[in-house]
Amino acid sequence: MKIGASTGCLYPELTENSLKFLSDAGFDLFEIFFNTFSELEPDFLDKLSSSCGKYGAKIASIHPFTSAYESYLLFSGYERRFLDGIRMYDMFFRTAKKLGAGFVVLHGMQCAFSSVSIEEYCRRFLLLSDEAASFGVTLLQENVHKHISGSIETIRCIKEILGDRAAFVLDTKQAKRCGFDPCELAIEMNNSLKYLHISDSNENESCLLPGSGNFDFRHFFDILQKNGYSGNAVIEVYGQTKNDIGSLIRSKQYLDKLISDNSK
């Protein structure tokens, strides 16, 4: 397992600057968190792709800035808007393909705006997933607080309905915010788990730099290894700046050592 970083760690730094600062710090695996429509335009993507080549950066995933609108756009009772939404998400799938990213992250439906059944939710996820696959990209359902994906019971239900088409990204902080152990969620997702967003936590904080809290990463990595997890992970925390990059480097070193020790 390789440890990378999300450009979202340095938000609201400009996306291209975040990529440069993190690359200069020694990271070479990234999730790109796109923040606006102009960042999806060909000229911008050409420059970003060129920078990736210059830095030796591999883009593992992209995260749409439209996550907050997915309930309305993709999972409302208005079918035509969903069909239009699929076409809108082509811009993210196309972007992922251009950057060589394997994954696009989906938050999905917020509980407060729940308007479709779990069966309908899964039908729409499959249609979106098929569209992503047409670009050579895999759509991943993230576990997110206050969303339909925020309970282990729903994750289990999605797995039962989708079978081998289920595909998840596990976010440790979101699991903590939902009140359950990320290790328990990893066991539930099992071979449907494709990717990780990781951060540390303690009794009072759910989103800390790895190594700054008391989350048992050693046990977590052991569970992943026993389940045959073969994917990668990105550090995803909030509120860092380029002046804090030394802390991000230390977090990566901390995780790299644990992974190395765990593989012996």
Image: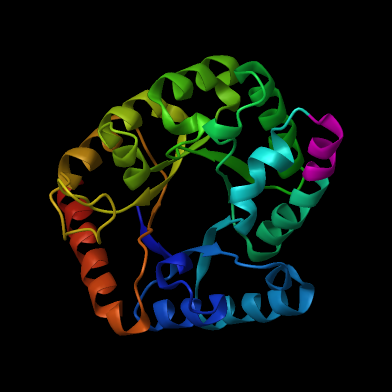
Q: Quadrant location of residue 238?
A: bottom left
Relative to residue 215, is residue 192 drawn left or right?
right
Magenta segment, principal secondary structure? helix
Going 70% across and 56% down the picture, which residue do you hit?
92
Furthest toward the front, the residue is 112
Relative to residue 2, is residue 48 drawn left or right?
right
Q: Is residue 196 magenta?
A: no
- Residue 231, given in percent of the width and then of the height, sits at 42, 45
- Residue 262, given in percent of the width and then of the height, sits at 17, 46
Going 66% across and 58% down the picture, which residue do you hit?
96
- Residue 136, given in percent of the width and then of the height, sits at 70, 47
Q: Which residues are magenta?
A: 78-86
Going 15% across and 44% down the picture, which residue do you hit?
216
Q: Is residue 80 magenta?
A: yes
Relative to residue 242, is residue 226 drawn left or right?
left
Q: Is residue 101 above or below residue 46?
A: above
Q: Is residue 52 above or below residue 231?
A: below
Going 81% across and 31% down the picture, which residue do you hit?
78
Residue 199 visible in the displayed image? yes
Q: Nearer the viewer, residue 211 or 118?
A: 118
- Residue 123, given in percent of the width and then of the height, sits at 70, 23
Q: Quadrant location of residue 158?
A: top right
Q: Nearer the viewer, residue 245 or 148?
A: 148
Residue 264 visible in the displayed image? no
